[in-house]
Image (cartoon, grey):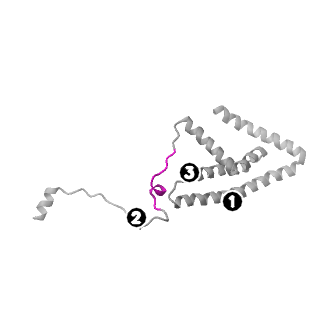
């Protein structure tokens, strides 16, 4: 695993620079830079649109008292996609745009979860009470907030003496 991380950290910039040189030699330096900036801008726009939609779905799940695990993981995938699009380069832009496709994102998240669960030591808990025990917009009854002080129970013998 450590070797793979090292390979990505060292290999990704090399591949990105090579791709920029190749594409720059075909279309020119200025169009290459403009293309990189345009993909970053388009990525930010996509992240905003899909991110707000995902946030709305998370809120709907919470309002119904459900745990929005899938939506939160989808939001995490969108965050990674947005970050990949902000990193200058064509390979990261391609990977970022691929992650913006919802079926691909769900498939990748499912594969990562299956891999994490197979490795062991990974648990996912869901609360049995709505919204983790917090009141939701649809809950009935007032919500009372307050402080308390624990008072020790009096001795039954003292109670008998006080009643007489």
Would you call the spot at circle 1 few (<14 residues within 10 Å), some (14-19), or many (20 or more)? few
For the residues labelled 2 and 3, say whether their Cβ atoms are less than 8 Å apart. Answer: no
Going from the N terminus, do you reach mark 2 or mark 3 first?
3
Q: Is mark 2 on a helix, strand or loop?
A: loop
Going from the N terminus, do you reach mark 3 or mark 1 first?
1
- Please give left or right for residue 10 compared with residue 53 in the image: right
Q: Which of marks 3 and 1 is in front?
A: 3
Residue 110: x and y in percent read 61, 44
> Which residue range is magenta in the image?
124-135
- Please give left or right for residue 85 compared with residue 120 in the image: right
| Residue under pointer 2 | 145
Q: Nearer the viewer, residue 88 or 163?
A: 163
Q: Is mark 3 on a helix, strand or loop?
A: helix
Q: What element carries label 1?
A: helix
Cα–Cα gap, marks 3 and 1: 20 Å
Q: Which residue is drawn at 53% across and 59% down?
A: 62
Residue 77: x and y in percent read 65, 49
- Please give left or right for residue 30 compared with residue 41 in the image: right
Cα–Cα gap, marks 2 and 3: 28 Å
For the residues labelled 2 and 1, say whether their Cβ atoms are less than 8 Å apart. Answer: no
| Residue under pointer 1 | 49
Labelled disc at residue 63: none
Q: Quadrant of the C terminus?
A: bottom left
Going from the N terminus, do you reach mark 2 or mark 1 first?
1
Residue 78: x and y in percent read 66, 51
Q: Which residue is drawn at 51% across and 42% down?
A: 123
Whether the magenta-drawn stretch holds residue 82 is answered as: no
Labelled disc at residue 69: 3
Q: In this view, does 39 lie above or below 145?
A: above
């Amino acid at each position: 695993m450590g070797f793979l991380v090292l390979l990505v950290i060292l290999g990704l910039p090399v591949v990105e620079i090579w791709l920029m040189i190749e594409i720059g030699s075909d279309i020119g330096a200025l169009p290459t830079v403009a293309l990189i900036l345009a993909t970053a801008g388009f990525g930010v726009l996509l992240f905003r649109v899909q991110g707000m939609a995902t946030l709305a779905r998370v809120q709907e799940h919470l309002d119904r008292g459900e745990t929005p695990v899938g939506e939160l993981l989808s939001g995490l995938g969108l965050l990674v996609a947005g970050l990949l699009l902000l990193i200058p380069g064509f390979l990261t832009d391609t990977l970022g745009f691929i992650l913006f496709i919802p079926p691909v994102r769900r498939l990748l998240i499912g594969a990562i979860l299956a891999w994490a669960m197979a490795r062991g030591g990974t648990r996912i808990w869901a609360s049995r009470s709505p919204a983790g025990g917090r009141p939701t917009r649809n809950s009935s009854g007032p919500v009372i907030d307050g402080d308390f002080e624990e008072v020790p129970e009096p001795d039954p013998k003292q109670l008998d003496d006080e009643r007489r």
